[in-house]
Amino acid sequence: MSSDLEYAKSVLKQEIAGLEAMYWALDANFVSAVELIYNKKYGHVIVSGMGKPGHIGRKISATLSSVGTPSFFLHPAEASHGDLGEISNKDALLVLSLSGNTQELIPMLSYANRFGIDVIAITANSESVLAKSANIVILMPGVDEACPYNLAPTTTTTMMLAVGDALALSLLNKKSFSRDDFKNLHPGGTLGKRLLKVMDLMHTDTPIVKKNTPMKEVLIEMTKKSFGCACVVDNDGKVVGIITDGDLRRKIGAEFLDKTADEIMTPDPKVVSEDMFAQEATKIMNKYSITSLLVCKDKIPCGIIHIHDCLRAGLA
């Protein structure tokens, strides 16, 4: 077992060495590639490659799309059988090939050159057909594969993947792609849940009463809105307290209905903003063992978020 572990670590060490070499090899051509794609305001990045680089290309294309650069993968063999029509000169063609002489790529490269479609190459061969057909070449340094026979694409595909990530995230940075933008593209799954904001889950029909409201009227408001609480505001409409079901149980007595909201309320309640991530609001409710939070803007209530809303969204 220890020998297997040592061998696995030697594979990782070889791939780390490849990434180190790629780090030092990255140059101004990479910057030019970012600029070229960034300036394609109305096109796509069409990624292509054959074999293992093709599989890496699919992932790069998916990453580009997920961070705001529209992209899709085009199989080079399918391209030669009619799918070249998917490419226009509004697009940029990103082609991955270690040798740069993969036969299936040649018809697509010829088409791109004939119709003025920009080509970005990621290759290790500066004298290849791919490199000579490309507008920009991101040249990979010569490294050994982690495969003991130096045959199976391993180190080189790791390097291609890393360059693709660097390209996608450099474009994200250049476009000032925000968390909100990310949320719009990732509404489902765990990422979508993490990016939900309080405004996405809150209720706007907040039960609100003034400080001097008799408790009889407070109870009517709480019952009508069914949140188990009421927000107490001053004459300027700013939050000064909250009355919860717990407050009612603790303070109920013979003269309870003769009291006003400010005599029963809990002052200075926990509040959140509508721009806060719902996950953070959930943490606050869990930390303080409370079931709801008032949502305020400049101390003016604009909504209420309940722990049940967070549970339904899978956040608690």
Image: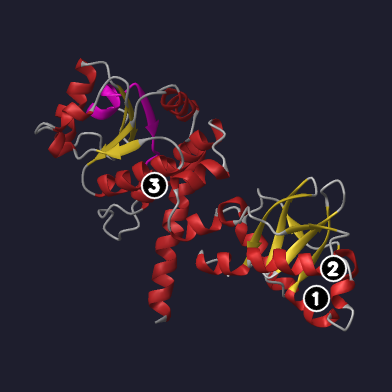
Marks counted in the figure total: 3
**Within-10-Å neighbours for mark 3: few <14, some 14–19, many 20+:** many
**Distance between mark 2 and mark 3 Cα atoms:** 58 Å
- N-terminal of the pair, mark 3 or mark 1, is 3
**Is 136 part of what is drawn in magenta?**
yes
**Distance between mark 3 and mark 1 Cα atoms:** 58 Å
Residue linked to disc 2: 265
Residue 188 locus on image (x, y percent) = 43, 56
Image position of 150 (left or right of 279)? left
Element class at badge 2: loop
Q: Are marks 2 and 1 in contact (CB under 8 Å)?
A: yes
* Colour setting: secondary structure
The region drawn magenta spans: 127-143
The N terminus: image quadrant: bottom left
Residue linked to disc 1: 247
**Distance between mark 2 and mark 1 Cα atoms:** 7 Å
Residue 97 locus on image (x, y percent) = 27, 39
- Which of the 4 quarters of the picture holds residue 263? bottom right
Residue 237 locus on image (x, y percent) = 82, 48
Report the disc number at residue 161: 3
Residue 295 locus on image (x, y percent) = 70, 54
Element class at badge 1: helix
- Which of the 4 quarters of the picture holds residue 127? top left
- N-terminal of the pair, mark 2 or mark 3, is 3
Q: Which residue is rendered at x = 49% and y = 27% of the image?
A: 31
Identified by mark 2, the residue type is Met
Identified by mark 3, the residue type is Leu
Q: Which residue is rendered at x = 26% and y = 45% of the image?
A: 54
